Image (cartoon, grey):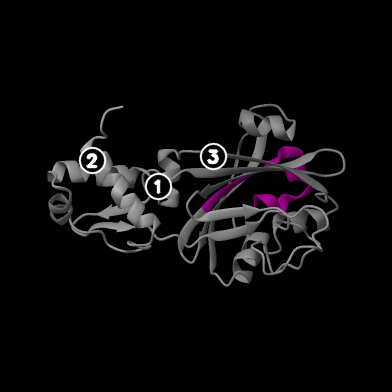
């Protein structure tokens, strides 16, 4: 096997120093000229190595400010409790969970009557292209884009729950609103996937190069049929999910959750 290209050597050396804490989160890296002298390489070679780290999501670059190590303040979501009405909530599940974590929630809404895409129609057991209501949320944690959430409700349900078409937030959360009307979500099915973001997702979530998104699809069910399909798209670098299943009485409270 031949010797690694010089730019790869530069990237590997800097990656090791980021991993061992020589350059911590938010630290600025030496300038291209300083790195070129250190590695006895041209600035173009150094730039190629730095761009490799940018593409891997380890560092970011700003015009005129150089390169710095990305800062990660991860938000952890307990997906088992999310939208579970047996747990106390102050408003909807998102606002409750973010507030309970000592963080600041903020979200914007868009509501529209639309045609149901195939991916969603399969899960709602309706015809592709049939009418549904889409409630789209753009969510922030501490003013940093956290996720987008697109929830489709089938047309038959909207007739029973007209508030779903309201353009603003439903104060008690849609899950509780539907339960109060007699359509209780008694179960859900989750699907988790990852991929690189689309240009629109990268714009809304302010994602840098090399950072993937986590796709969380939750289909909610009443006693006899699906009542909604929610697709949450999260920044892969700022989110972590966990589930709690079964009896966890043996869990040490000091353990990570």
- The disc, 3 or 2, on the residue closer to the chain's N-terminal end is 2
Q: Judge left or right: residue 88 versus residue 9.
A: right
Q: CA distance from mark 1 to mark 3?
A: 17 Å
Instruction: Look at the picture and state if 146 lies above or below 9.
Output: below
Q: In the image, is residue 116 above or below residue 23?
A: above
Front residue of this view, candidates 111 and 252: 252
Q: Which mark is residue 203?
A: 1
> Does 128 sit above or below residue 179?
above
Q: Which secondary structure lies at badge 1?
A: helix
Q: Nearer the viewer, mark 3 or mark 2?
A: 2
Residue under the point 54% across and 44% down: 214
Q: Residue at x 62, y 58 (%)?
A: 77
Front tag of 1 and 3: 3
Q: Are marks 1 and 3 in contact (CB under 8 Å)?
A: no
Q: Name which residue lies at 60% across and 69% down.
A: 101
Local crowd at mark 1 within 10 Å, few (<14), some, or many (≥20)?
Answer: few
Distance between the alpha carbons at the discs numbered 3 and 2: 29 Å
- Please tell me whether residue 30 belongs to the stretch shown in magenta: no
- Foreground: 120 or 115? 120
Residue under pointer 2: 7
Magenta region, residue range? 147-166
Residue that carries the numbered disc 3 in the rendered image: 194
- Mark 1 or mark 2, whichever is nearer to me: 2
Q: Is residue 212 left or right of residue 88?
A: left
Which quadrant is the N terminus positioned in?
top left
Counting residues from the start of the chain, the first of labels 1 and 3 encountered is 3
């Amino acid at each position: 096997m031949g010797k690694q290209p010089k730019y790869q050597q530069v990237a590997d050396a800097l990656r090791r120093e980021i991993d061992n804490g020589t350059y911590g989160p938010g630290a600025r890296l030496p300038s291209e000229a300083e790195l070129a002298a250190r590695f006895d390489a041209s600035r173009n070679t150094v730039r190629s190595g730095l761009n490799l780290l940018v593409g891997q999501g380890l560092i970011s670059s700003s015009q005129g400010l150089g390169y710095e190590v990305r800062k990660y303040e991860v938000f952890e979501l307990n997906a088992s409790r999310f939208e579970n009405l047996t747990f106390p909530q102050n408003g909807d599940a998102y606002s409750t969970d973010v507030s309970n974590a000592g963080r600041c929630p903020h979200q914007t809404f868009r509501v529209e009557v639309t045609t149901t895409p195939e991916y969603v129609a399969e899960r709602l057991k309706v015809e592709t292209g049939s009418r549904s209501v889409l409630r789209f949320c753009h969510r922030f944690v501490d003013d940093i884009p956290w996720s987008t959430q697109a929830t489709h409700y089938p047309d038959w349900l909207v007739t029973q729950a007209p508030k779903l078409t309201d353009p603003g937030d439903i104060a008690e959360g849609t899950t509780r609103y539907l339960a109060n009307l007699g359509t209780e979500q008694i179960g859900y099915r989750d699907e988790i996937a990852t991929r690189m973001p689309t240009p629109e997702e990268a714009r809304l979530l302010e994602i840098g190069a090399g950072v993937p998104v986590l796709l969380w699809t939750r289909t909610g069910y009443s006693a006899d049929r699906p009542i909604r399909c929610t697709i949450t798209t999260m920044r892969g670098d700022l989110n972590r999910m966990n589930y709690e299943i079964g009896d966890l009485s043996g869990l040490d409270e000091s353990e990570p959750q």
